[in-house]
Image (cartoon, grey):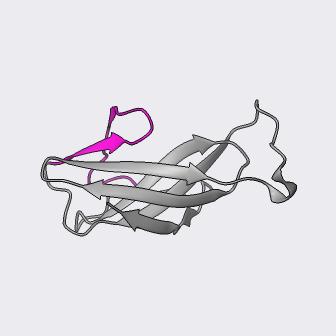
Amino acid sequence: MTRDGRTLRIVLFSSLLPLEKVVVRERARSVTVTVFQGRLPGGSLPPGDIAVIRCVKLRLRSALGERRVVDGRTGRERRVERDRYTVPADGPRCQRLRTVRR
């Protein structure tokens, strides 16, 4: 999370499928984030045992503050590194995906 508290960088392990969109649901006590993946051209699926590290960057409507971040797929709370996490230069580049707000 950036110093202003409104930009989240989400680092995730995913398959080789392209990332498609992010659904964000902001509530008074939590922010739920769900990342969706698409399909490869031709509808084929990549091998299941390959994972890549990806980074998604998204902007919240208001600062995160004391709200918790919830994984929309699992429903579990995720740890947030406040004011110190940066993506290393040799790490994944953050993508900006189409964001759907609910």
- In the rendered image, residue 83, in percent from the top left (x then y), is placed at 27, 56
Q: Nearer the viewer, residue 29 or 4?
A: 29
Task: Evaluate whether residue 86 shows in this view.
Answer: no
**Residue at left 34%, top 31%?**
76
Q: Quadrant of the C terminus?
A: bottom left
- In the rendered image, residue 91, in percent from the top left (x then y), is placed at 60, 54
Q: Nearer the viewer, residue 85 or 45?
A: 45
Dominant SS in magenta: loop
Task: Evaluate whether residue 30 shows in this view.
Answer: yes
Is 4 displayed left or right of 79 in the figure?
left
Is 45 displayed left or right of 66 in the figure?
right
Q: Quadrant of the N terminus?
A: bottom left
**Residue at left 47%, top 58%?**
22
Q: Nearer the viewer, residue 26 or 2?
A: 26
Q: Nearer the viewer, residue 21 or 12?
A: 21
Is 82 displayed left or right of 38 in the figure?
left
Q: Is residue 61 magenta?
A: no
Give the residues drawn in magenta, as a range. 67-85
- In the rendered image, residue 67, in percent from the top left (x then y), is placed at 17, 48
Total numbered badges shown on the rendered structure: 0
- In the rendered image, residue 3, in percent from the top left (x then y), is placed at 25, 65
Location of residue 61 with respect to 76 vertically, above or below: below
Is 58 displayed left or right of 92 in the figure?
left
**Residue at left 53%, top 61%?**
21
**Residue at left 50%, top 69%?**
98
